[in-house]
Image (cartoon, rainbow, N blue to C red):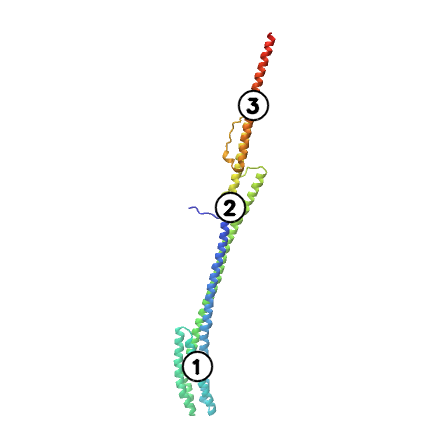
Amino acid sequence: MKMKTLRDIKISTKLMLLGAVSILGLLVLGRESVSTAWKINQAGMVLNDVWMNAVIVAEELNTATSDYRIRESRHAVTTDPQLMEQLESELWQLQQDINEKFRLYEKLPTLAEDQELMQRAKAVWNEYLDYSRILIETSKGNDRELATEMMMGVSQELFNEASGLFLDSVAHTKQIVDVEREQTDRLYHRLSHIKLLVIGLVSMVVIILIVSLIRSIREPSKKLAEAARRATGGNLDIQLDDTAGDEIGILAGAMNQLIQRLQDIISDEIHMFQEIGSENFDIKSGCEQAYRGDFAPILYEMTSLQSRLKEMNRQHAEEAEKLEKEIERLKKRVMEDEQE
């Protein structure tokens, strides 16, 4: 099956193809933009609603436990009963706040690894609180040396472990945030690249079609106009390129057929007039098929002219014959008169 080239495709088809390619390109670009924007939005929502909240809660837990540690240290070194009572109240309030933050973290849809780290931190913190109650009672008994030793020993180790787990949780979550941000960046760059690719492809196809349309219309139109001008001036020595399969090619082919018909009719008329001038009134047209439509009256009138001339020639011949007979009759009469 022979493949059509661009110059053989009809102009209307090229225009429809141009519109279809433009619309298709816009649809692909729009669909990809919406899809990628949705993914970027989802990634942003995850960053804001999950990972960033997880980071905030973990950092608040680390801060709250540090505040608890500071007040516990003040309790261990003070001898003021009123200040001790105030610090104990603040420590109890901080415990409630810390427990609430643990519950809040557990409700966040974080990864299992993050929840596991936070559970380990909670277990160590509860162990720290158990030891802290003993330390507070020791401090309330005014045994400063033992309270200080406890603060610097096991209590410090448990606090460091819990604080380290909080920081590990924050670091792990931030790492996930960085991964999500990288994914968002990749999606954004992908969207940008696809936009550029689609725009480039659509632009290339559109440019090719536009150039093809211009070439299909401009040069052939000039040639058609020139051919019409020359034909109007009586010059029928014209042959247009009608190899293209589009509308211009079809029009050029029709123009060639019209010019060929005119040439056939003119040549036929010249030949017939020459034969009629040679008194050949029985001459027939050599291309009767060319006298179709509005050209038919030409052949009809030519045939009528032949008939009239033929009749006139017959009448002339009859008159000449009569005249000749009359002359013969007169000659005979003259001869008879002379003999008498």
Q: Where 291 falls versus 281 (above or below)? A: below
Nearer-the-camera pick, 6 or 274: 274
Q: State left or right for residue 32 relative to residue 327.
A: left
Q: Quadrant of residue 222?
A: top right
| Residue type at numbered disc 1 | Ile
Select label 1 or label 2 by which is in front: 2
Q: State left or right for residue 161 relative to residue 274.
A: left
Looking at the rendered structure, the secondary structure element under dot 2 is helix
Which residue, given by chain and number where applicable, does mark 1 sit on? 98
Q: State left or right for residue 150 relative to residue 289.
A: left
Q: Where 307 falls versus 233 (above or below)? A: above
Asked if residue 181 shows in the view, the reply is: no
Q: Earlier in the sequence, mark 3 or mark 2?
A: 2
Q: Are marks 3 and 2 in contact (CB under 8 Å)?
A: no
Alpha carbon separation for disc pair 1 and 2: 82 Å
Looking at the rendered structure, the secondary structure element under dot 3 is helix
Select label 3 or label 2 by which is in front: 3
On residue 247, the disc is: 2
* Within-10-Å neighbours for mark 3: few <14, some 14–19, many 20+: few
On residue 315, the disc is: 3
Alpha carbon separation for disc pair 3 and 2: 56 Å
| Residue type at numbered disc 3 | Gln
Q: Position of residue 5 (x, y in %)?
A: 47, 47
On residue 169, the disc is: none
Asked if residue 224 shows in the view, the reply is: yes
Q: Position of residue 301 (x, y in %)?
A: 55, 32
Q: Position of residue 186 (x, y in %)?
A: 46, 65
Select label 3 or label 1 by which is in front: 3
